[in-house]
Image (cartoon, rainbow, N blue to C red):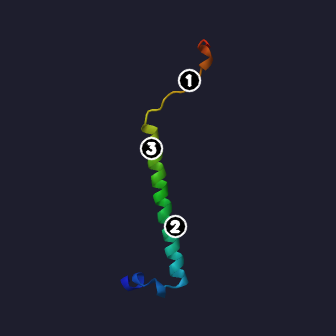
């Protein structure tokens, strides 16, 4: 098995297809985990509240 993996020049079309699909799946899983971690980190951080009533102050 290791000689097949170490020499991609001898791979068939099916092996290249499986390797491409597997690479895409791994990349997608890493991206989803990264985005989920960013969302969870942003939810836990404290946000400033917007000033929703700027007209209540007297203008100068």
- Residue 54, image quadrant: top right
**Residue occupied by mark 2:** 24
Q: What crowding class fits label 2: few (fewer than 14 Cα within 10 Å), some (14-19), or many (20 or more)?
A: few
Q: Quadrant location of the C terminus?
A: top right
Residue 51 is labelled as 1
**Residue occupied by mark 3:** 40
Which element type, helix, strand or loop, lies under badge 3? helix
**18 in relation to 26, above or below:** below
Query: Of circles 1 and 2, which is in front?
Result: 1
Which residue: 46% across, 83% down?
A: 8
Q: Nearer the viewer, residue 50 or 57?
A: 57
Which residue: 49% across, 57% down?
A: 31
Q: Which residue appears farthest toward the bottom when viewing the image?
A: 10
Q: Residue 39's x, y, as percent? A: 48, 45
Q: What crowding class fits label 3: few (fewer than 14 Cα within 10 Å), some (14-19), or many (20 or more)?
A: few
Q: Residue 38's x, y, as percent? A: 46, 47
Left of 11 or right of it: where is 56?
Answer: right
**3 in relation to 23, above or below:** below
Q: Residue 36's x, y, as percent? A: 47, 49
In 3D space, how far apart are the residues under numbered discs 3 and 1 (Cα atoms)?
Answer: 25 Å
Which tag, 3 or 1, sits closer to the chain's start?
3
Q: Residue 21's x, y, as percent? A: 52, 71
In 3D space, how far apart are the residues under numbered discs 2 and 3 (Cα atoms)?
Answer: 24 Å
Mark 1 in CB contact with mark 2 (< 8 angstroms): no
**20 in relation to 6, above or below:** above
């Amino acid at each position: 098995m290791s000689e097949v993996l170490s020499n991609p020049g001898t791979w068939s079309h099916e092996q290249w297809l499986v390797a491409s699909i597997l690479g895409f799946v791994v990349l997608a899983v890493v991206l989803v985990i990264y985005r989920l971690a960013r969302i969870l980190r942003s939810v836990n951080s404290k946000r400033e509240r917007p000033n929703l009533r700027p007209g209540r102050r007297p203008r100068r």
